[in-house]
Amino acid sequence: MSGSTTVPTMDAFNAVVSKVDALNTRVTALEHGAPPVPPNPVKPPSADGTTVTNTTGEIVDGKHRTFKLTGPASNYQISTDGQVSGGMVVRLYAKGQLCYQENVNHDWWVMPLAATTHGDDNWVGCPNPTGVAPPIPPIPPVVAGVPAAAAAVGFTKLTHGPDVTLGKNWFPVPGGSQNVSQQPDGSVLDRGPTDQGAWHYNDHFGTDHNLNGGFGGLAFGGGGYFEVTMSIQNRIKGWCNPGSDPNCKGWPAWWSNSVEGDYGIPNNLPDGMGIEYDAAEFLDGGTNKFSAGIILWNGSGGNYNNSQAGQGNGFTGPANFNFAEKHRYGWLWVAATDTTQGYIKNYMDGVQFGRTYTWSKYKGGNWEQTKSDPWSPMDMGHHRLMLGTGPENPMTVYSVAVWQKDDSHNIRRGVPLPG
């Protein structure tokens, strides 16, 4: 019989009715409101070789964490699912379902899959994963007798040192209980204080002193390259707390502090702010490590340091590194301008190591406001240099040299010119 029609079974008919009912239900729901937002799909790990050099790209690792660059191009940081870390980053790179970062010094770091947080301390130093060597930077012009780091930024004038002569260009803390003495070869030996009260914050001899009730000595402004040649018997624990440890009499330290607020020198910054720079503090005595940190102080004794800012820093030498031998500990301070960032870099025997601390030109602001760019007051101060140690770790200082563009920003009273 032509034109016949197949009659569906009751089960098939009921199935069609159920589909129609479901569609009607969805149409009604759509008419009364927006449909539910489906969950975001899980992003697959980025392919090996994926590279990010600006804020528009991203890397996804094997744990489906998303890594992006954030901030200004001159100081990229890394946002890992919203948690920001790092600084001076030039690119992110994917390999083996891991995210790597490269900084301006062509050092590489990787975020392990096992990491449960994503701050500075979670990144692990590693070899270059790309297999391609970084470009060789241009060699700065050589200026006879000037360290390469100083010559590269135009700091070619010797404004202090290199001799270290007590009572002439370096001044011991009054009282003598710090055990600082000039040696026959011209070096200065610091044996550490005889008692806890004389530890004096590891400021046993420095470029400043009290001159007729006011400032005497030399404090440096406008930037410079500062380098000490010394040897340290780094035998016992480096850091201790004089407030709780009755045996604590100090630790090896090469550091600086702004003089504003002392000796009657006015401090015109809000809340009496100033910067301390600890170029080399030996906090792991008996090891091959030391730290290089920076602190923002206010006039009430409050401080905000690089660790609080998530900017850990330090030096770890090779296994056979011996602090008891002569080594050169240097740091370079370049002031910020309207268009460029200021920075501090650290050097061991002329080779840069560790983190570069950066800041923008200080634009005003009180203590709490300044913490958003905490090291910017560095350029507003004049900085004295200091050295000291504890009795467990005697220190011999052979020379200290300061190189600057010129000495026009320094405070000099009662100190002869070098040479």
Image (spheres, rainbow, N blue to C red):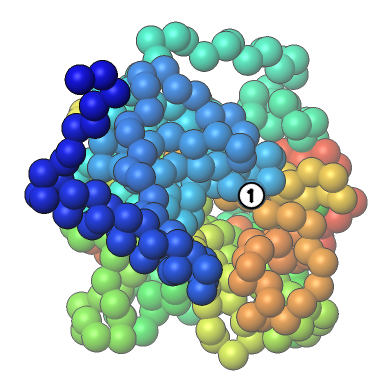
Q: Position of residue 154 (x, y in %)?
A: 79, 31
Q: Amino acid at mark 1?
A: Gly
Q: Closest to the observer: 388 or 154?
A: 154
The answer to whether residue 313 is above or below residue 318 is below
* Residue found at x 70% / y 62%: 376
- Helix, strand or loop at label 1? It is loop
* Residue found at x 49% / y 65%: 30
Locate residue 247 relative to residue 338 in the image: left or right. Answer: left
The answer to whether residue 404 is above or below residue 374 is above
Q: Quadrant of residue 147?
A: top right
Locate residue 395 relative to residue 383 in the image: left or right. Answer: left
Q: Position of residue 174 (x, y in %)?
A: 54, 77
Q: Quadrant of residue 45?
A: top left
* Residue found at x 58% / y 29%: 53
Using a 10 Å C-alpha cutoff, classify the residue at mark 1 as few (fewer than 14 neighbours), some (14 to 19) or many (20 or more). Answer: some
Residue positioned most to the front: 1
Q: Position of residue 238 (x, y in %)?
A: 27, 60
Please give the residue where the numbered disc 1 appears in the rendered image: 71
The answer to whether residue 361 is above or below residue 157 is below
Q: Position of residue 13 (x, y in %)?
A: 18, 49
Q: Closest to the observer: 147 or 53?
A: 53
Q: Closest to the observer: 394 or 48?
A: 48
